[in-house]
Image (tube, rainbow, N blue to C red):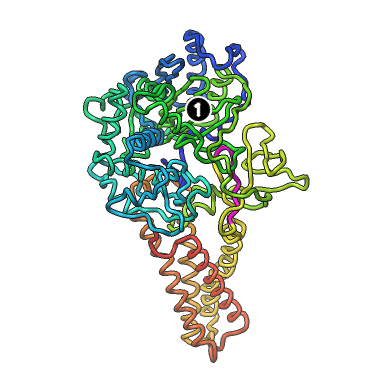
Amino acid sequence: MRANNFGAVLGVLIGCVTVVAAAPAHAAPLPECAVVGTPGLAEFLDDAVPRLLRQDRIPGAVVSVVSAGSTAFAKGYGMANVEDAVAFDASRSLVRIASITKLFTWTAVMQQVEAGRLDLDTDVNKYLKGFQIPAIYPQPVTLQHLMDHTAGFEDYSINVAARSAAAIPPLGRYLAEHMPARIRPPGEISAYSNYGAALAGHIVAEVSGEPYDAYVQRHLLDPLGMSRSTAAQPVPSTLVADLARSYNTDSDPPQPIPFTFDNLPPDGSISATAVDMARFMNAHLHPGSVLSPATAARMHQRSFAADPRLDGYAHGFKERTINGHRVLTHDGGWEGFRSMLMLAPGCDLGIFLSLNGTGVGAGAAQFIDAFFDHFSPAADAPARTAEAAAAPLPVAAPRAGFYQPTRHNESTVEKVASVLGPSRLTVDGDGTVRFKGKQWTTQGDGLYRATDGSDRLVFLAGSRGRLYAATDGPAYEMMTRSEELPFNLLILLAYAIPALAALAMPVAWAVRRIRRRPSGLTATWRAARILAASAAGIGAIFLLNLLATLVGNTDEFLYNVPLSFRLLLCLPLLALGTGAASIALTVKGWRGSAAGVVSRIHQIGLLAGLLALTWFLWQWNLIGWQF
């Protein structure tokens, strides 16, 4: 959730974990699905985790592994608090598990389904008392859509955090006042949504009559014996001394990051120890404590896939196929913590890992690869279950262009981040697709596979002419021509050329004054020229500052839109107002202005450039304060 630009998604991307890395040379693979030798497990982790910390310059980590219904391993590595020299302890050190909190929220939803208070296929508006989801599409949003991240909400990052507990608004009020736009029909494609998870947690609170954090404590943490975990913000006084610190390890030296309060608690508020997370993993691998075996089995079934040949969702868990094994996963990133939880039900195996630094890179994916290569080596791919077997969208032909994640913003100022972050997709003459730094070759029937064996891809035709590129991990949406970076660069070029030429106007006027040559222009024409040049200059100042904001550190936007950016958004209005006045004076003074051909052509070009700028500002929601 923490981001360096609008709409960015931080955290370890479990969906992009590769499955081809070799196990360390010193460790021969154990029998399939076996984690039977704790000494061997300890030897592996005592080598792999410190190596990961060194590679990615992370201060510390905690890890726990469950197998055969018990905790096979739990240990801390490195420092939980660098300043006070506190080492990580798997049984004492609390980490912010961020979006892994969603698994607790989805488990709570399934508890209420089991109790008969909720139905996954019912319109969520039935359960909402203080506000309603607007009926933009004929299909209602259901809890199943929320669990599968297919509700069709846009994404946003502004004002998702608070600096203190007192600044956190009541969840229901926040959800009503910060409802994202619905940008596609529910059930069409997955687009990860923090708002959707928070909405589900609010519904649990509504039907149970208990605040979210109290519900989690009473119905999940306490029954599981997770006595050193909490969903409360701030962390209770009995636990706060053992809360690990996180660090911005992209800076040198690494800087500690303060506790950041989540305005959407059901999406990421839980702090927990690795030992407690082992209890949660075992509760899903060996149900009966907080979910009945039947309900847990239902929860672990596939509930959505963009195409039956791709990995999908299982009631809030993300599916991945690793070494032929079906793995249920979730990751999380908040403050500087990067965490992952992975369950392989067929192997009765689970692993939780949390790192307290922002600089998590390829080392985390390599660690997971090596772990599964060592303890769950290659097996036959799992058979797809009947659930959600039918593809919701028809397969389409590949099309070259620019693609953005389906998780993006369309209705607010955050949309402008899309222009800088799309991925280009090309199609070679032999049909090979190049996308996301990989080559994808056709497997027939519209299925493509990355040449490194790590992922699969299918193109799908969505509603309203949308085209999706769905992978085993995220899904992507083809951008329209007007949204593509090259087209927008041409628009800005149409503005920039006459705007830059306007810089020569003061020089020309100064030369005329020195030579004492009167221009012969009317006051109206001179005013029109001055206003047009001023509008162009104001626009240039705005665009330069906007670019600096987008490529800089935007962490402040997590709490609210900074005053500096609010003031910056005054400039487009000033430029447009000045440009409109210039147009009016140009029309009025066109006849009898005594202007030459060059002056008239330049004025027309300058006004056309301002129209191009106006289109750019409108396209990216930069006119006014749209947030």
Residue at 52% across / 22% down in the picture?
346
**61 lies above or below 336:** above
Q: Position of residue 420 (x, y in %)?
A: 54, 51
Q: Position of residue 505 (x, y in %)?
A: 54, 74
Which stretch did the figure color magenta? 466-473
Q: In the displayed structure, does residue 162 sit left or right of residue 195? A: left
Residue 443 belongs to magenta span: no
Residue 467 belongs to magenta span: yes
Which quarter of the image is occupied by the N terminus?
Answer: top left
Q: Position of residue 626 (x, y in %)?
A: 40, 60
The amino acid type, in three-letter code, at marker 1 is: Asp
The residue carrying mark 1 is 56
- The answer to whether one can see residue 523 in this image is yes
Q: Position of residue 430 (x, y in %)?
A: 78, 45
Q: In the displayed structure, does residue 543 sit left or right of residue 396? A: left
Q: Nearer the viewer, residue 274 or 104?
A: 104
**409 lies above or below 387:** below
Which quarter of the image is occupied by the C terminus?
Answer: bottom left
Q: Nearer the viewer, residue 624 or 440?
A: 440
**595 lies above or below 33:** below
